[in-house]
């Protein structure tokens, strides 16, 4: 059986021929040169898309043409977790003389894909990405492209790629075990963004812990919007086997639960215990302060940036590196613990 010959990779000359311009014009368009007319640039960009051309990163590095800039794409800049990660990325990049182009995908894979393409053709020297959907097929092309990519928080599932994440399953077990130590038995898990690998891992950790402790069948409350919360919680609290503790898997679900419980006049820490996954500053300021699993957000940003810069500089040749950082339990009063004097 004859082995299939891999398709020929498009070159800069191929793009120039397709666009009807010189190779220098293509190079200038890719690098944002001011003397290329918009009409010519459109022809070049169209040819680049049609041929699937990707600038050769190794060649750019050898000729000293690196832009000394990297891209960072996160789902939501308003999310405190991603704000901390973004700040750490910028600080680490700045220390190495790199500029960061920051974009938010708004949780939309189509927007994210367009941002990745724009950054790759800008071009930046590498991209840090928090994928909206780790299984989206376009990510395979991205991971195998010429521009180095490091996934933050959520590893790309459709291809081998560098990633930096945290111990999601172990963190969930830590949270639930703490509730069990308080004597809680009817512990429900409240979750949003169920399609994310990180959320799936946290739910698995919750289920494992409940099973190991031989507690009642796990209850998973799936939320698609803030409007679902009060109805879901009402069912839990009006059941014959009333829920006595909640484990919320991310910031969104934790905040929604806090607001709903306040409206329902259900006192956290007394009427029901609560432990969240991910920690933000204001959790320590509300009453009662919220017990959480803290992710090392700054370290995620620092380490992923260092890894990307190593890839850009070709400092190691491993096909992919997956780094998993530990999480910690921050004990406050929402779980039933007493305030430390």
Image (spheres, rainbow, N blue to C red):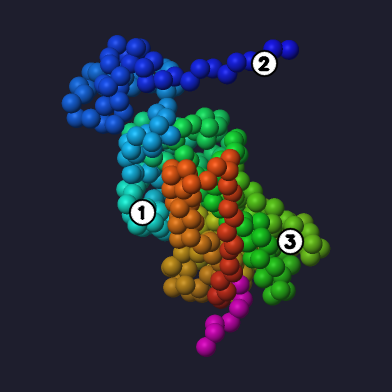
Q: Secondary structure at mark 3?
A: helix
Residue 10 in percent (x, y) is at 44, 19
Residue 264 visible in rendering: no
Disc ID at residue 209:
3
Q: Position of residue 19 (x, y in %)?
A: 32, 14
2 vs 3, front mark: 2
Q: Is residue 160 visible in this depiction of the protein?
A: yes
Task: Give neighbour class at mark 2: few <14, some 14-19, many 20+ (Cα, 10 Å).
Answer: few
Which residue is painted at 34% across and 12% down in the image? 17
Determine which residue is flagged by label 1: 96
Q: In this rendering, would 94 be left or right of 274?
A: left
- Residue 186, picture quadrant: bottom right
Q: Position of residue 53 (x, y in %)?
A: 42, 23
How many angstroms separate mark 2 from mark 1 (CA)? Answer: 44 Å
Q: Position of residue 5 (x, y in %)?
A: 60, 15
Give 36 or 273, whichever is nearer the viewer. 36
Tell me the distance, in whole angstroms, between the alpha carbons under discs 1 and 3.
43 Å
Q: Which residues are magenta?
A: 334-341
Other residues around mark 1 within 10 Å, as few (<14) / some (14–19) / many (≥20) = few
- In the picture provided, is 195 more to the left or to the right than 41? right
| Residue that appears at 57% across and 74% down | 331
Mark before the other along the chain sequence, 2 or 3: 2
Mark earlier in primary sequence (2, 1): 2
10 Å neighbourhood of mark 3: few (<14), some, or many (≥20)? many
The residue positioned 49% from the left and 50% from the top of the image is 307
Query: Is residue 48 depicted above or below 62 in this figure?
Result: above
Which residue does the numbered mark 2 point to in the structure image?
A: 3
- Comparing 133 with 47, the one in front is 47
On screen, residue 232 versus residue 10, left or right, reads right
């Amino acid at each position: 059986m004859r082995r299939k010959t891999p398709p020929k990779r498009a070159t800069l000359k191929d793009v120039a021929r397709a666009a009807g311009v010189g190779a220098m014009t293509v190079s200038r368009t890719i690098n944002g040169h001011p003397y290329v007319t918009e009409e010519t640039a459109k022809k070049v960009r169209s040819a680049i898309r049609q041929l699937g051309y990707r600038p050769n990163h190794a060649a750019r590095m050898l000729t000293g043409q690196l832009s000394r800039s990297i891209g960072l794409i996160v789902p939501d800049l308003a999310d405190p977790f991603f704000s901390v990660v973004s700040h750490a990325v910028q600080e680490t990049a700045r220390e190495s003389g790199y500029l960061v182009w920051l974009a938010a995908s708004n949780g939309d894979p189509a927007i994210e894909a367009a941002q990745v393409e724009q950054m790759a053709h800008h071009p930046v020297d590498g991209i840090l990405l928090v994928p909206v959907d780790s299984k989206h097929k376009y990510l395979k092309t991205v991971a195998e492209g010429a521009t180095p990519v490091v996934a933050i928080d959520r590893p790309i599932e459709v291809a081998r790629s560098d990633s930096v994440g945290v111990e999601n399953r172990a963190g969930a077990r830590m949270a639930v075990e703490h509730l069990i130590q308080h004597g809680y038995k009817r512990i429900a898990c409240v979750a949003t963004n169920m399609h994310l690998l990180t959320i799936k891992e946290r739910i698995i950790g919750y289920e494992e812990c409940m099973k190991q402790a031989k507690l009642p069948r796990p209850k998973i409350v799936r939320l698609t919007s803030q409007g679902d919360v009060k109805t879901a919680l009402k069912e839990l609290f009006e059941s014959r086997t009333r829920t006595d503790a909640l484990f919320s898997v991310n910031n969104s679900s934790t905040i929604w639960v806090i607001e709903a419980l306040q409206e329902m006049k259900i006192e956290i820490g007394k009427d029901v215990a609560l432990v969240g996954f991910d920690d933000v500053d204001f959790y320590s300021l509300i009453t009662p302060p919220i017990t959480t699993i803290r992710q090392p957000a700054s370290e995620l940003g620092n380490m992923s940036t260092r890894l990307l810069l190593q890839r850009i500089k070709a400092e190691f040749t491993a096909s992919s590196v997956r780094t998993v950082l530990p999480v910690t339990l921050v004990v406050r009063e929402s779980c039933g613990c007493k305030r430390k004097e």
